[in-house]
Image: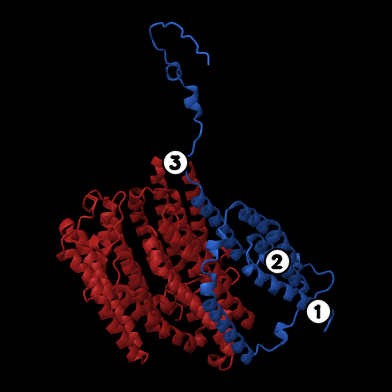
Amino acid sequence: MMSPFDYAMPEIFLLAAVCVVLLLDIFLTRDLREVTYLAAQASLLATAGVVYTHAFTGNERLVGLGRHYVIDELGGVLKISILLLTMVVFVYARKFLRDQSMWRGEFFVLSLTAVLGMMIMISGYNLLVLYLGLELLALSMYALVAMRRDDGRATEAAMKYFVLGAIASGLLLYGLSMLYGLTGELSIRQIHEYLLGVPDSGANLPLLFTLVFLVAAVAFKFGAMPFHMWLPDVYHGAPTIVTLFLGSVPKIAAFALLMRLLAEGMAPLASGWSQLFLVLGLLSVAGGNLVAIAQTSFKRMLAYSTIAHMGFILLGAMTATHAGYSAAMFYVLVYALTAAGAFGVLVVMGREGFEADSLDDLKGLNERNPWLAFIMLLLLFSMAGIPPTVGFYAKLAVIKAVVDANLVWAAVIMVVMSVAGAYYYLRAIKMMYFDKPEPAPGSGGISVNAETGLDCQIVISLNGVLMLVLGVFPGLLMGVCSMALQASSL
Amino acid sequence: MSFEQVLFYLFSAVLLAAAAGMVTVRNPVFAALLLILCFFTSAALWILLQAEFLGIVLVLVYVGAVMVLFLFVIMMIDINQAELREGFVRYLPVGLFVAVAVAMEMILVLQSAGFGRSDRYQGVQHLPGYSNTEALGELLYSDYLYPLEIAAVILLVAIVTAIVLTLRRRPDARSQNVSQQVRVERSERVRLVRMVAEKRQERKTS
């Protein structure tokens, strides 16, 4: 028999670790900041260990802690991916923060609290807990974006993110309060049962009214097309390492929110939200890919490509079938890994006082650092969905699920837009391999930092190689996704 | 109309007027004061609903602490009125149109469906001895302990964030370094110059 607080063991452990890191950092001098970094990495790894022993016991899913918390394999897989990816982010952060003289312990503390918020969201089984987890994540993110406060662009990005994020939170809260008013329940399971009892729930106006607000809030968190305005500015304005973190890990948490709130809680209303997601997804796939072509900043280009990728995830979830959910989960995990790698290359290309940002910085990368160029090639191939890499399989799985849902026309649009998207990925590859390096005026030429730490090199290499390995053996990850969802009967 | 209903409509009308005034008045101090009026009338509405604890907390926390601080901030910083209102007239028609459209749509949808007054929405009547505070506290620290703890973590993050964004060493800040002051040597303070003695100059009389 578990005592109530045994349920939330990983979160409690991580919170304790965050407090230790926070206090430790105060007593360390600048030269010893390395210890903060190591402590942050150790707490992530240890938390991953706790999650592993906690979630994969082979038992049925457990709902506890006053019906606020659920333990299941879906949560376990998502949490472990988040923790491991954040470790990767921290490796890049060590190099980046030193180069840009932002070497402060608060980055690690705030990232850890963001991870805590994501974990709370992932196993939240109550509207209140889901909302609070989301706020914890968002608040930490606002602070991370604004951390370089003497930079006007970063401050502007943080302001936009904050104001639009607050509006999205307002939408979500309004939807949640309506849902509570209609059902009288806060727990996901109870809401599900209540909705099953509503006759003809698909045509119930107040319920659909509620649904619109919830879907809008979820779409905002994903950055899907009509709710995407914040994304390019924030990606562009934030320090690259924050963009790397923001652009990869929280997408997994957003997927968890979608799963818990809509796929589980509002499953009886699936016909309602899947229509909305179909529109949002197609708009994102089309708009994201087309606008990305016109970008000159690499970070902005990746921001619009993110919008397109999020469209794929929404379209996978839209089918409301097991295959669709598995495809969406596979896609979000692969996307997070790919985005971390692509922004990671940007971090590795930067050096003291210089941040790689424009597409021109990629020019002639092959001459300067062939291995890095090859890794980037793999990552971009994966984003474009070119066969030997894993991105191809991810796109294929989603498209197959959409076709199986009898939406062939939607699948056709997805394929056509992916081809349009391949243009700007291939253009970047062409710049790396066939263009001459352009020395920026006054900066003495852009050279790849020769003394990139060994840890960065290993991580980025692993990241690139994984694109190939997972591309050749996609069944491994797909099996994990499918099994985890099966265990939650989704 | 019962007395309670009269009170409800009175407070609601004041609340709506104050809220509308808050966003439209020119002077930021008046806006803050109108916001305080909003809080007072909402507190009164809470109390009408027999949620006296929430009403009191709203007055104590928001009016007593938050808004007073807010007023200080408004008075401290120099807000450029003209710059703030620059786009107001230009964006007003669009904003107004969207707001009215959304509001109308929401009203139409909710009207047509009708939330229907069922038992579910009937207000609860409590006996005179009932303590709202006690019931709330019991619920908060038993059933809702987990969300409460998360809220506490959010407050912790807010503190860390505030410090991260404001605490920094300014390069032009001047401060005393006591140990350096103590270790000062004579040679740093006084310079002895060897020079030939000169005859004292006559002072000019002007």
Q: How many labels does the image show?
A: 3
Q: What residue type is labelled 1?
A: Val
| Label 3 environment density (alpha carbons within 10 Å; few <14, some 14–19, many ≥20) | few
Residue A313: name its quadrant.
bottom left
Q: Is residue A77 above or below residue A286?
A: above
Q: How crowded is mark 2: few (under 14 residues within 10 Å), some or many (20 or more)?
A: many
User: Measuring 62% from the left and 56% from the top, which residue is drawn there?
Assistant: B74
In-front residue for pair A196/A64: A196
Task: Give coordinates of residue A182: x percent, y percent.
Answer: 62, 83
Q: Chain in blue? A: B
Q: Which of B69 and A19 is in front in this view?
A: B69
Query: Circle 2 sits on which residue?
Result: B39
Between the C-alphas of marks 2 and 3, the distance is: 42 Å
Above-or-below relation of B136 to B105? above
Closer to the observer: label 2 or label 3? 3
The reply to whether residue A398 is in sight is yes
Name the spot of residue A245 as percent of width and height, x first. Answer: 39, 62
Q: Which amino acid is tagged 2?
A: Phe
Q: The red chain is which one?
A: A
Q: Mark 3 lies on which chain?
A: B
First in sequence, mark 1 or 3: give its number: 1
User: What is the three-letter code of the residue carrying label 3?
Assistant: Pro
Whether labels 1 and 3 share one chain:
yes
Dot 3: element: loop
Residue A192 in view, yes or no: no
Front residue of this view, candidates A228 and A116: A228
Q: SS class of the residue under badge 1?
A: helix
